[in-house]
Image (tube, rainbow, N blue to C red):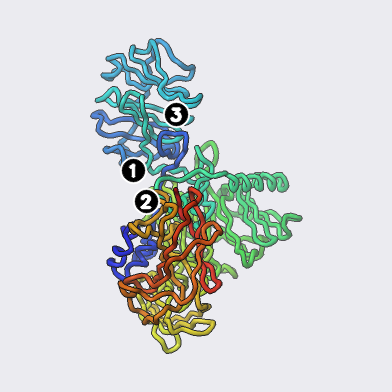
Amino acid sequence: MCRRATIRAVGCLGLAALPWCVLGLAWGQETGSGWRHLGNSAIQLGTLPSAATGPVDRVWYSPDGLSLFAKTASGRVFRTGDFEQWQLVTDGRATPPAADEAAAPSTPELAFKLATPSGSPAAAAGRLYGIGNDVYRSDDAGVRWVNLTSYKGACLLGPGLRAATVSPEDPDDVVVASDAGVWRSLDGGVSWTGLNQFLPNLPAVHLLGLPSGTRGVRLELAGVAREVEWAPGEKSAWKPMDAADVEREQNLKGALSQVLKHSVTAIAAAEDYIYAGDSEGRLQVSADAGVSWGPVFKLGDQGKVGEQGKVDAIWVDAADPRVAVAVLGGRSSGAGSAKPAYVLRTMNGGSFWDDITANLPENAAAHGVAADRGSGAIYVATDAGLFYTTTDLGSAGRPTVWSSLSEHLPAAAAVTDVKLDAGGNQLFAVLEGFGVYTTIAPHRLRDARIVNAADYSARATAPGALLSVLGARVESAHSEDVAAPVLDATETASQIQVPFEAKGDTLSLSLMAASGPLTFGVQLKSASPAIFVDPDGTPLIMDALSGVLLDASTPAHASSRIQVLATGLGQVKPDWPTGLAAPMNDPPRVAATVHAYLDGSPVEVTEASLARGLIGFYLIEIQLPRIADTGPAELYIEAEGQQSNRVRLYVEQ
């Protein structure tokens, strides 16, 4: 709620609470309880009437016409009564009606399926619907047909029509299932709208990229779009992108398959090391950028019972590529029987792999893996949910116990991929149907980390700036003999302000946390600006006149003034006490000269001061130029030669 508030309203929310609300950091008190959904399950395809989603196999109405059911390609059944929100049906009693064998006297296409039950009131009145490559209607019991969806040589609802149903109460109410979701018409097929905005059916396969600068979360999908992005500031749906990343990886897998004479299904690389896993569970490593390859490793050769599935994912330590973790196991083709899932670890560049599967569910296919070398944390995405353990990634040890992190995630959803951000601070998981969820990485509760509060980066800090301590409830903090105010603290994260009195090149912090004393050293500069962003990269930028938060649905206007909330701009004039909220009238001005750049060109900064009523926040007011390109633009600020993070600002004329 506070992300849409005006600056004045934001100030009224409370000084300590604001940063957590802004950043989505109101994490739960227990590990895994602070999951936050990034994006939704809808895809914006420009040729369709409204947002799409993944393939849906069947749709049918309840006998009274009050509920609509949809069976997705993954086999899950959902129900809606308001034709907007969908609920998962878990009792197994919702089954589609038997196929109607009735035939029409004529059909408009060879591969044609009737959608109107023969005993329905609509059929009795001569109203029939059917699907082929398009949707058709007949008002004379099937003698003549009208094409309802053909537009410029293609189907208005996209390719792959799979099923259709008609309301038992209204012959004008027809619903179609397709490769792109669920579509409904209330006027006999004259107009159509999607019911996909809140149907959890996003066919997400892999995480291709995490939020960084002006880029958002990127996913590989199965189905109507190959690669999509939830851009910073996006509010409506995932947008298709050029599938360059997906094609590049497929091409590399194809090339390695030719070299290794087996179908490569997973690859990972760091420095000169290349790891490859294939469809039969083999693992092979090159330590010289692919010039030569080491021996093949396969669990079956180690006397393991049961046939392992394909290698689905490999994680490699960028700092020491001799260390890697691979996951394998899944469904066999044809019979559909499950194969045991395994997690394997190597510490010697693939010469040998240790089995650290331990207590993971045996028959749950494993799809993704992420790890943090410093803490020994490993995360595995499986059909049975997301699992976490800690082990020694640098030396052999006994298998460790895995814990589930799925308790506070949507039930019965397979996890298809998992990743950590570059700092190992945020965990991202992809849930089949639901999309992307993120939380503070649970291993941070054992290995606290101090980061910039605005963007979770490890950038230098500055006098007066805000820092977040991830993984610890901080009770008090000091820099030398000066107190650093603790503005907010939970079991998983705390926020402190750097004293304005801080001097030197390094800020030495001594913290007393609930778990014991902590010490950190952070590089200190006179200014180190950072713009506040959400976990999905949405910046905290507002219209100066209305105070409305700007994003993709509410862009800035050319010639308007915008206000950016940042931290790390250093000293102010007149001096201001650490830990005290800035005054509502005439707040202290930033001592340094602040510059702003839009798509690389300088724009006018009309004000740079402490943000009224807040602690550690700075407000930069910018006058946008009269002529500006429409669409997303890159914005950043600069002070004392130090540049902030790049953020995405949407601008229109």
Q: How many marks?
A: 3
User: Which residue, given by chain and number where applicable, does mark 3 sit on?
Assistant: 156
Left or right? Give the position of 593 relative to 198. right
Residue 516 drawn at (x, y percent): 40, 81
Q: Nearer the viewer, mark 3 or mark 2?
A: 3
Q: Which residue is depicted at the point 72% across and 57% down?
A: 289
Q: Quadrant of residue 49?
A: top left
Q: Residue furthest right?
A: 291
Q: Which residue is depicted at the point 68% across and 60% down?
A: 273
The amino acid at mark 3 is Leu
The amino acid at mark 1 is Leu
Q: Quadrant of residue 141?
A: top left
Q: Secondary structure at mark 1?
A: strand
**Tag 1 and tag 2, C-beta contact below 8 Å:** yes
Instruction: Classify 10 Å Cα crowding around label 3: few (below 14), some (14-19), many (20 and above).
Output: some
Q: Secondary structure at mark 3?
A: loop
Give residue 88's mark.
1
C-alpha separation, residue under disc 3 versus residue under disc 2: 32 Å
Q: Residue furthest bottom?
A: 481
Answer whether residue 447 is visible to the viewer in this image.
no
Q: Quadrant of residue 192?
A: top left
Q: Nearer the viewer, mark 1 or mark 3?
A: 3
Residue 149 drawn at (x, y percent): 43, 25
User: Which residue, given by chain and number where applicable, does mark 2 sit on?
Assistant: 410
**Tag 3 and tag 2, C-beta contact below 8 Å:** no
